[in-house]
Image (cartoon, helix red, strand yellow):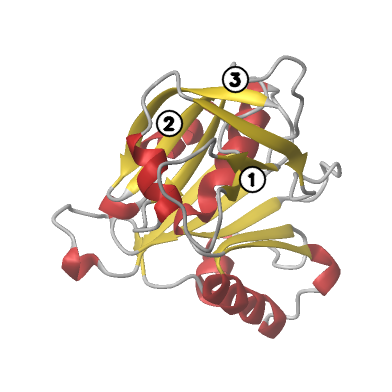
Amino acid sequence: MDTQIIKKEMEAEGTLSVYLKKPEGFIYKAGQSIDLFLINPPETDAEGNKRAYSLSSAPEEDYLKITTRLRDTAFKRVLQKLPDGNPLTLEGPFGDFTLQNNTSRPAVFLIGGVGVTPIRSMIVDATIRNLPHKLFLFYSNRRPEDAVFLTELKELEEKNKNFKLIATMTNMEDSKESWSGETGYINKEMLMKYLPDLNSPIYYMSGPAVMVFAMRKVLSDAGINDNDIRSEEFTGY
């Protein structure tokens, strides 16, 4: 499908959002992803001209948005420099990392860094549609400067009485900002502080593979059934 860049903006230190024109008839569920292709880029590398991105936009929004950490790769260098209006192509949507239909069980998101992109889509979607799901987002970053969508997530918490944000920072000694929220890594004690029953929710985790592995171990050690865990690993961002 043909698309084009509407605009780009920095979301946090080293993190870029690219707004794309939504192709006519393109329908997706919150949490799904696309493959994005550069057209005749001026440079390329062994990773090629295609990348998979979770959509950070919600289906109700009139654009598509991808959000990515900037790395020194040919694809990222080209994408960062492309002007507004530049054509791209996409395929999708893909994936089943979407909010469960069962509204009687809370959805608990255990998220690291830019892994929040599909979760932003789900939470905005749930807020717009007034879904009854209880939503808990445990969101881990090194510093507030690195935390994508942090201000918007706080605003969504004010709008949606069913949504609770628990943001935690693991490296505040390197931050220039103040922080009064949680610190340290997400662990069983932190979950128990905010969740009345660890066995009640469906758990979602996304982020770096090491983060997803660590969260799986936390849940496994807490006796959570594997059938109640859904994960998506972000690699190479």
Secondary structure at numbered mark 2: helix
Q: Is residue 225 left or right of residue 191?
A: right
* Label 3 or label 1, whichever comes before in sequence order: 3
In terms of image quadrants, where is residue 81? Answer: top left
Residue 54: x, y in percent? 61, 45
Can residue 150 be spotted in the picture? no
Residues under labels 2 and 1: Cα distance?
14 Å
Pointer 3 local density, CA inside 10 Å: few below 14, some 14–19, many at least 20: few
Q: Which residue is mark 2?
A: 155
The residue lying at 80 percent from left, 49 percent from top is: 96
Kindly indicate whether the residue at mark 1 contacts the one at mark 3 (C-beta within 8 angstroms).
Answer: no
Element at label 1: strand
Q: Amino acid at mark 3?
A: Glu
Residue located at (53% from left, 72% from top): 211
Name the side, left or right, on which 86 lies relative to 127. left
- Callout 3: helix, strand or loop? loop
The N terminus sits in image quarter: top right
Q: Which residue is mark 1?
A: 135
Q: Residue at x 59, y 46 (%)?
A: 53
Question: Mark 1 belongs to which amino acid?
Answer: Leu
Instruction: Residue 16: give x, y in percent of width and height.
Output: 38, 41
- C-alpha distance separating marks 3 and 2: 17 Å
Of the two numbered discs 3 and 2 on the same chain, state the one appearing first in sequence.
3
Q: Number of callouts in the render?
A: 3
Give the CA distance from mark 3 to mark 1: 20 Å
Residue 61's mark? 3
Quadrant housing residue 31? top right
Foreground of the two, 197 or 131: 131
Say whether marks 3 and 2 touch (CB < 8 Å).
no
Amino acid type at mark 2? Glu
Query: In the drawing, what numbered circle is on residue 77?
Result: none
Few, some or many C-alpha atoms within 10 Å of disc 1 (few <14, some 14-19, many ≥20)? many
